[in-house]
Image (cartoon, helix red, strand yellow):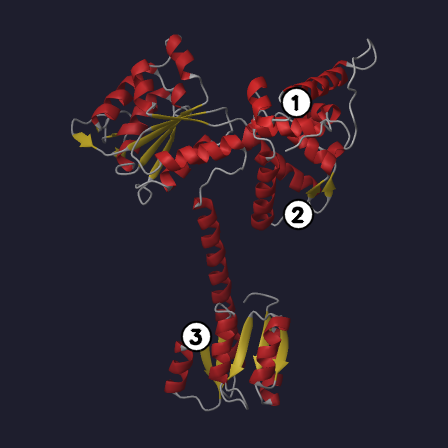
Amino acid sequence: MPSKAHILIIDDEESIRFSLRGILEDEGHTVAEAETGEEGLDMLNSEKPDLVFLDIWLPGIDGLTALATIKEHDKSLPVIMISGHGTIETAVNAIKRGAHDFIEKPLSLEKVVIAAANALEFHNLRRENQALKSRIAREHTVEVTGESSPILQLREQIQRVAPTDAWVLITGENGTGKEIAARSIHAQSKRKEKALVAVNCAAIPEELIESELFGHEKGAFTGADQAKTGKFELADNGTLFLDEIGDMSMKTQAKILRILQEQSFERVGGNKTMRVNVRVIAATNKNLEEQIQKGNFREDLYYRLRVFPLTLPPLRTRGKDILVLIGEFHDAMVRDQGFKPLDFTKDAERALLDYPWPGNVRELKNFVERMLIMFAGQTVDALDLPPEFGAAIRNAPPCGAALPEQGIEPGAMDFKAARNAFEAVFLESKLREFEGNISRLAEAIGLERSYLYRKLKSYNIQTTE
C-alpha cells in the first residue's frame, strides 16, 4: 500500500470514523474526518485527500449526491462507498456514478486495508498514466521555437511546404534543430498519421547501411539469421528523414538515387522488387555544393533532394530567441525532472546574448541542464557562468555604462575594449546615416535586425524604434 496517503472519512457515525481512523493510521496514513456531506465537501480544497471513504446514508446531502459533487471537483479522486444497508442495486448505482469500490458495515480490518490499498494504487497508476500522456503530447507537439525574423520566416516556409509531398533539403550548422524542423514538417503534412522514420547516415557503418535502408533476406550475409525490414519499407506512405546525408558514401548515394527516382528497391540478398510511397526529407551540416566540387557528393542526387531547400539559422543570429529557448528548456526540466527553478541576473542575460553558441540550440539545452544541476533555486550572475563565457562577460559593458564616442588614444585600453569602442562609434555614425532606420542599417552592414538592435542597446545608443 502506498505510504503517507491523506484520507478523508465522511460518515455521521462517530464509532465508524473512530474505527476507520485507527485502521488507516496503523497503515501509515493521515486521516481527516467529516460528520456530514456538506462538511466533507467543504474540506476537499483544504485537505486535498488522496482517497475518500464516504457513507451512503448521511443527514442532509446524501452520499450519492456528495459522490457526484466530488467527481465534479476531481474526477480522478477515488471514493470508497460504505453502507450498513447495502444492496446489490445500491452498490451498482454507486459504481456507475464513479465510486471506486463499495464495502458494507460492519467494517473489517482486512476489507478496509485491501479496499484502500487497491484504490490508492489505482489512483497512482492513473495519475502516472495522465502524466505520461501529457509528456508524450508535449513531445509530439513539434514546432520550431522563437520569434526572431529568421525563425518567423522559417516557420512560414515550413507551413507552406508541409502540406505538399515536396521533398525537402534542410541545411544548417550542427545543433541548429534540423531534426525538429523535419518533424515539424511531418507533423503538419498529410502523412502525419503514418510513420516518420529517421536514419542517421553518419552513424551507420558503410557495410551495413544498405541493409538498414533496404532491409535484407535471411542468409543474405553472415549473421543474417532472419529477414529484416528496411527503413524505406517502414516509411511507406510516411516520411523518411535522412539525417547527415552529406556523410553517405558515393556508392550508397548511387543506390539511393535510383530508389528515389523509381520508389522501388530489392532487399539485400533478395530479388523481389518492393514498391513504396515515401516522402524524403534530408538534412546535412555540410555545404553540398562544395562537396560536389570535391567529388564527394553526386550532383544529380543533390538536385533530386533539393526540391524545397530550408536553411536553419545559427543561434548566434537569433537575438533574444536565446532567452526564450532558455526559458522553455528551464521550465520543461523543472516540470519533468523536479529541479527547483533558477533566475539569471541582467548581466548574466547580457553575457548569454553575447556568447556565440558554437554548438547552437543543442549546446544551449545542455547549458540549461548544467545550470539547474549547479544552481537550482538560486539566482545566477554573470560570474557564475562557465569558463567558456569569459570572453562574453569581459566584452559586455556593465548595465548602463557608456562607451567612448571619440577616437582611441594608443595604449588607452586593451584590444577588446578598443574594438567595442570602435563598434559603438561605427554603429552610431551609421544609424545617423540611415536616419535611425534599423532595418535598412541591418541590411546595409549584413547583420540580422534583432542582433543589431541588441548591439545598439548594449552600447546605450538611442534608437527611435
> Which mark is nearer the camera, 3 or 1?
1
Label 3: how many Cα within 10 Å (few below 14, some 14–19, many 20+): some
Q: Nearer the viewer, residue 344 or 377?
A: 344
Q: Position of residue 207 (x, y in %)?
A: 33, 21
Name the residue at the front extreme: 435
Above or below, 440 relative to 233: above
Q: Which residue is mark 1?
A: 431
Q: Which residue is mark 2?
A: 341
Q: Nearer the viewer, residue 346 or 205?
A: 346
Quadrant in the picture for residue 303: top left
Q: Are marks 2 and 3 in contact (CB under 8 Å)?
A: no
The tag on residue 147 is: none
| CA separation in Å, label 1 and label 2 | 40 Å
Quadrant in the picture for residue 310: top left
| CA separation in Å, label 2 and label 3 | 38 Å
Above or below, 419 relative to 100: above
Q: Amino acid at mark 1?
A: Leu
- In primary-sequence order, the first of circles 2 and 3 is 3
Q: Are marks 3 and 1 in contact (CB under 8 Å)?
A: no
Position of 312 with respect to 207 (left or right) is right
Q: Residue at x 27, y 21 (%)?
A: 257
Q: Residue at x 66, y 41 (%)?
A: 373
Label 2: how many Cα within 10 Å (few below 14, some 14–19, many 20+): some
Whether residue 433 is visible: yes
Q: Position of residue 167 (x, y in %)?
A: 32, 29
Quadrant in the picture for residue 353: top right
| CA separation in Å, label 3 and label 1 | 68 Å
> Which mark is nearer the camera, 1 or 2?
1
Quarter placement of the N terminus: bottom right
Q: Amino acid at mark 3?
A: Gly
Q: Position of residue 3 (x, y in %)?
A: 59, 66
**Label 3 secondary element:** loop
